[in-house]
Amino acid sequence: MQIIKRNVELRVDDSLMRVYVAAPKPEGRYPGIVFFSDIYQLGGPITRLADRLAGYGYVVAAPEIFHRLEPVGTVIEPSDLGRMQGNDDARRTAIAHYDADTRAVLDFLKSESSVLPNKLGSMGFCIGGHLAYRAAFQPEVKATVSCYPTGIPIGKLGKGVADTLQRTGEIHGELLLVFGTLDPHVKEPDRHTLAQTLEKTGVRHQILIYEADHTFMRDDGPRYDPAATDAAWNELISFLKRVIG
């Protein structure tokens, strides 16, 4: 499906938040997805993932997660210095601010005439996987895809300690988790903790595990795994189609 792309300006706590929106080109009404980047924000590898998702028939809205700290349009380079910058931005962002941004993007999607407001989901990668997991606390989020989410078992997300794991029982929709066995940032004990918590709280979920590294779906680096990426896409699209259409 062909897509159209645009940038939208939202104001959250008087901070300008750029939201990259990719949507199907044919007129109609589609499910909406709030889509979270990794610490490098909305560079080409992330917007290509958003575009790909839109092509399956979703209105995808991706916010700049560090808009309170970085000038609008900032893309952090995936280098040693960029990693320091992105991790520092993450550390300095209040958890309540992340949640407020999620709320703003969901409200934006619900206001769009091309979005089916009762068919909303979330998706994210790395820190964005953690944010997508938290987005699932919102009652209108019916389907969540969380790809190699970092920091959930230890509460590492932003300023202070995140209560994400403890709030897992607030998830009323369905959750799909995507992991790589070679991931040094989300190791087997963390995966086990998440799976155990989801089982105990009764959250409907699926877990996909590939022999792949962290950020294996990001197509600009040495950890990119095209075969694992395609396999994950097949599964996550089937999941989204089943849950929200």
Image (tube, grey):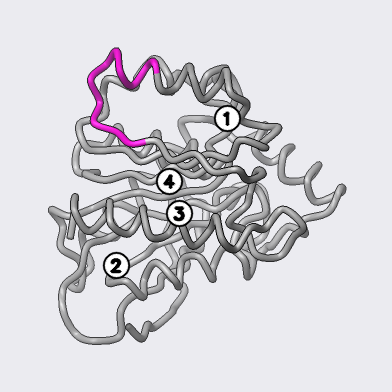
| Residue bearing the label numbered 3 | 232
Would residue 68 appear left or right of 76 to someone viewing this image? left
Q: Quadrant of residue 220?
A: bottom right
Q: CA distance from mark 1 to mark 4?
A: 14 Å
Q: Give, as a single range, the part of the protein colored magenta.
A: 196-206
| Residue bearing the label numbered 2 | 58
Residue 175 placement (x, y as % from top left): 31, 38
Q: Nearer the viewer, mark 2 or mark 1?
A: 2
Q: Secondary structure at mark 2?
A: loop
Residue for point 45% across, 45% down: 13
Q: CA distance from mark 2 to mark 3?
A: 17 Å
Q: CA distance from mark 2 to mark 4?
A: 20 Å
Instruction: Give above or below for 137 relative to 216.
Output: above
Q: Nearer the viewer, mark 1 or mark 4?
A: 1
Number of callouts: 4
Q: Nearer the viewer, mark 4 or mark 3?
A: 3
Q: Quadrant of residue 25?
A: bottom left
| Residue bearing the label numbered 1 | 157
Residue 222 placement (x, y as % from top left): 77, 57
Q: Is residue 203 magenta?
A: yes
Residue 176 placement (x, y as % from top left): 36, 41
| Residue bearing the label numbered 4 | 101
